Image (cartoon, rainbow, N blue to C red):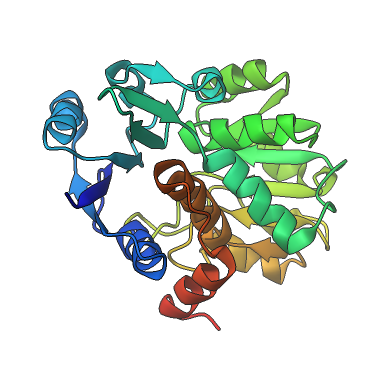
Amino acid sequence: MKKWFAVIGDPIAQSMSPEMHGRWFSDNGIDAAYIPVHVTSDRLGQAVEGLRELGCSGWNVTVPHKSAIIEHLDEIDPFARQMNAVNTVKVMEDGSLFGMNTDGIGFVRSLEEQFGNSGKEKNVLLIGAGGAARGIGYALVSEGYGPISCANRTLDKAERLAGELHAEAISIEEAEKQLARFGLVIQTTSVGMNFSAGGAPIDPSEIQAGTIVCDIIYNPLETEFLKLSREAGGHTMNGVGMFVHQGARSFQSWTGVQPDTKQMIDIITKKLGGI
């Protein structure tokens, strides 16, 4: 019987996961399909049961369901439980649902692929306090990055995340004023994504030249935040690498096969208008 996998979220039409996983299935001779499923927050529980009953072998989880899905799963990887965010679900042989998070380590692998270890031992500014920020924050701590400062439009959310990471919490306004002290700046919100309003979560004009500036958005390839950061002298990284590396870890957990990440980064970059 042909296996099938999915990605769930709201919105979901913009996702390039189906194309990526479909290519990997084809390249590795795996008879499987991967489809996008639009799921609103009020229908999440029904969607999870539907996926299980219809024989889905696993799925990815994107905004806004990464934390909410946990209550609908049977078992959670300790790391994902700690960060309270799941982006990958695997249906086990007994039909139980196992949740994990590949976002954070996917980001770190992408960062090190582009910049080596130059991001370590720098002051880190993490912008945002959602599931992606939490995953990246925990991965950064586990990989020896920091110290970390968490900034968010809603300060109490930044304070909660900072408490979990043993980090500092600052307001967006403070982050803008203090940008010069950070050597690694990571933007994790949806501001600037292709389906959301444009703009930047903070004004990066005061960053120091040479600062590593990352935006986990991959469509568009260069958000307004990255453009302004580049013009200010920052070394920028978009979200394509993180997207591919987190997807590769999901793919490997489902199939046991490690896909070609370098080729996929090139394919997606070119498809989105890059070189």
Which of 249 and 266 lies nearest the eye of the viewer?
A: 249
Residue 84 spot, x, y in % from top left? 48, 21
Which of 149 and 38 lies nearest the eye of the viewer?
A: 38
- Residue 239 vertical position relative to residue 274 in the rendered view, above or below: above
Is 57 displayed left or right of 139 in the figure? left
Residue 213 spot, x, y in % from top left? 69, 56
Q: At 16% across and 32% down in the image, what residue appears?
A: 47
Q: At 80% across and 45% down in the image, what residue appears?
A: 182
Which of 156 and 108 lies nearest the eye of the viewer?
A: 108
Q: At 69% across and 68% down in the image, what residue appears?
A: 230
Residue 190 visible at all: no
Residue 78 visible at all: yes
- Residue 80 vertical position relative to residue 235 in the rendered view, above or below: above
- On-image quarter of the C terminus: bottom right
Q: Residue furthest bottom?
A: 275
Q: How many marks?
A: 0
- Residue 168: quadrant of the picture: top right
Is 14 displayed left or right of 227 in the figure? left
Is 260 displayed left or right of 273 in the figure? right
Residue 151 spot, x, y in % from top left? 62, 33
Which of 32 and 135 lies nearest the eye of the viewer?
A: 32
- Residue 171 vertical position relative to residue 24 in the rendered view, above or below: above
Q: At 53% across and 68% down in the image, what residue appears?
A: 265
Q: Residue furthest right?
A: 121
Residue 149 spot, x, y in % from top left? 72, 31
